[in-house]
Amino acid sequence: MIQHYLNLKPYSMKTDEKRKIMLRNLNQLTQHHYSNCNKYRQIIDGLWESKILAKKIEDVPFIPVSLFKSHELSSVNKKDIRSTMTSSGTTGQTVSKIYIDTQTSQDQQKGLANSLQHILGKKRLPMLILDTDACFKNPEFMNARGAGVLGMMRYGRNHCFALTSDLEPDLKAIKDFLEINGSAPFFIFGFTFLVWNKFHEILKNNNLDLSHGILIHSGGWKKMIESAVDNDVFRKSFKKHFKLERIYNFYGMVEQLGSIILEGPDGLLYPPNFGDVIIRDPKTFEVVPFGKTGIIQVLSIIPHSYPGHSILTEDIGVIEQTNNSSNDWNGSGLKIIGRVPKADLRGCSDIISQKMSS
């Protein structure tokens, strides 16, 4: 299903053109999941009164991301499940479980490669990972952080982990990596809260030259919100202390691996040709006008083994740009505002529960 999109630059399709093509693919996925996942069928019957075929992309049935925590949602036989991914969570917290088959895994890899090559080029670069290798010790049952690191490692080589198992900088390993690879382009990856708190803040006075690096980061600030800095401060400080200028944030989630919403040159986040975003009112779930904030709905044609092709997230955002003048960055330019307030989240859950029980 994804192959058609891979022959194009990943962020090149204008919104209307993309949505016409995606609609057919999304309707096929809705039918597939409705036929093969009993719990998804029950959810759609409750929320959408069995209306599974959409005439426009805004009408594609969505399900709240929280349902992946409370329901076992799989559309393939157990014997076909290749791996199970889990969302991040503190000890004792319920996490999402995402069941991946071979087709979904392959499409995730193809989609991610298509997006990353837009920034990194087609040759694999030496890779500095701002994390510890302890984050993915159990590949059979992996959380979002471990899956993210392992997934990104496919697109780099000569991997170096910058943090120890205690999440302290391994300065010798970093310096050794830079001595060998630092004079030519190299790939840097990490999760935002670790990149800032465990790398930037500790090593900013060590005169490390990352001027040839390309940093891709994601994940926000998790439980470290008190130390959060805005994107502009983040960029300026890395330039000042590390001479690092090529920095790209992206928005993604374990429920839609492979489809990353990547930061463009204007600082907004753009979905790839095989994905899209819609903003909805948190009380009515209607699509809001352009430039208004609301809950982010994410769409992707990748999920085949589980019904994750149309998801209502728990994040607030706004679309500030549509169809950039640059041919390299088209589609809906998204700005993330933050998380849905807990009170509003409970209200959303109540509305959804009422619809499912009515």
Image (tube, helix red, strand yellow):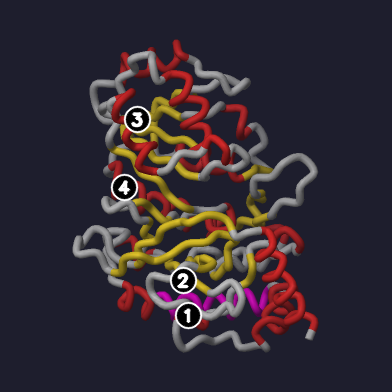
Q: Which residue is drawn at 54% across and 58% down?
A: 256
Neighbour tally class for label 3: few under 14, some 14-19, many 20 plus, Cα within 10 Å: some
Point out residue 203 in the picture as x, y percentages from the top left corner: 43, 18
Task: Say the numbered circle drawn on residue 58.
Answer: 1
**Camera-side mark, 3 or 4:** 3
- Residue underneath mark 2: 278
- Tell me where residue 53 sits by quadrant: bottom right
- Decide: is 124 above or below 98: above
Give the structural element (helix, strand or loop) at label 2: strand
Q: Is the magenta stretch mostly helix, strand or loop?
A: helix
Point out residue 50 in the picture as x, y percentages from the top left corner: 66, 87
Give the structural element (helix, strand or loop) at label 4: helix
Q: Residue type at mark 1?
A: Glu
Tags 2 and 3 in contact by the CB under 8 Å rule? Answer: no
Position of 145 with respect to 17 (left or right) is right
- Residue underneath mark 3: 238
Q: Residue at x 37, y 80 (%)?
A: 20
**Camera-side mark, 2 or 3:** 3
Q: Which residue lies furthest to the top in this view?
A: 172
Of labels 3 and 4, earlier in sequence is: 4
Q: What whole-number distance in Å separates the C-alpha atoms at marks 3 and 4?
A: 23 Å
**Camera-side mark, 3 or 1:** 3
Tags 1 and 2 in contact by the CB under 8 Å rule? Answer: yes
- Residue underneath mark 4: 117
User: Residue 234 magenta-drawn?
Assistant: no
In-front residue for pair 33/323: 323
Looking at the rendering, the stretch of residues picked out in magenta corresponds to 22-36
Q: What whole-number distance in Å separates the C-alpha atoms at marks 3 and 1?
A: 39 Å
